[in-house]
Amino acid sequence: MSLEEAELREAMAHRLHAASQEALAGQPLLERWAIDRSLGGACLVGYVSGHPLIADGRFMRSSLIRRHAPEAGWALTLNRFYRLGTSMEDWLTASLEASRR
């Protein structure tokens, strides 16, 4: 692949990411989220804000996950899209590191 092709691919990937973030802007945000498989299928759990039915700051469980792209910051469940903030794993790691200082 030439340098020009690589630059074009990178530019297109950046535009797609920006468009995805813009489209997701109005969707609920999950913070300290994790995947829960305790009920036989994969669901999201975490603290939500911006949900049309659940008060901000409440801990919630989603419907089953259909698609999941944490590196892109989103997940699609049977009912809706979610923006993914900090995962529970990353939050715990940061909290432990901060407590050691």
Image (tube, rainbow, N blue to C red):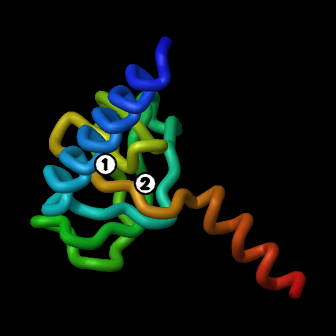
Q: Secondary structure at mark 1?
A: strand
Q: Nearer the viewer, residue 3 or 26?
A: 3
Q: Nearer the viewer, residue 87 or 7?
A: 7
- Taking the image as shown, residue 70 lies to the left or right of residue 83, namely right
Residue at x 18%, y 61% (from the top left corner): 25
Residue 51: percent from left, percent from top: 18, 65
**CA distance separating discs 1 and 2:** 6 Å
Q: Splitting the image into 4 quarters, where does residue 79 fall?
A: top left
Residue at the image position 43 percent from the left and 66 percent from the top? 31
52 w.r.t. 1: above or below: below
- Left or right relative to 38: residue 67: left
Q: Quadrant of the C terminus?
A: bottom right
Q: List the residue tagged with mark 1.
A: 62
Q: Residue furthest top?
A: 1
Amino acid marked by disc 2: Val
> Farthest residue in the right direction?
100
Tell me which label, 1 or 2, sits earlier in the chain: 2
Which type of secondary structure does the marked residue at label 2 adopt?
A: strand
Residue 95 vertical placement versus 6 (above, below): below
- The image position of residue 5, as x and y in percent, is 39, 20
**Quick check: marks 1 and 2 in contact, CB under 8 Å?**
yes
Q: Estimate how packed mark 2 is, as few (under 14), some (14 to 19) or many (20 or more) residues with alpha carbons within 10 Å.
A: many
Reading the image, the residue beneath label 2 is 45
Judge by depth and name the residue closer to the eye, 21 or 91: 21
Who's the residue at 27% across and 72% down the image?
A: 49
Q: Could you tell me the amino acid type at mark 1?
A: Ser
In this image, 55 relative to 91: left or right? left
Residue 4 as seen in the image, left or right of residue 76: right
Q: Which mark is residue 42?
A: none
Neighbours of disc 1 within 10 Å: few (<14), some (14-19), many (20+): some
Point out residue 41 in the picture as x, y percentages from the top left corner.
42, 29
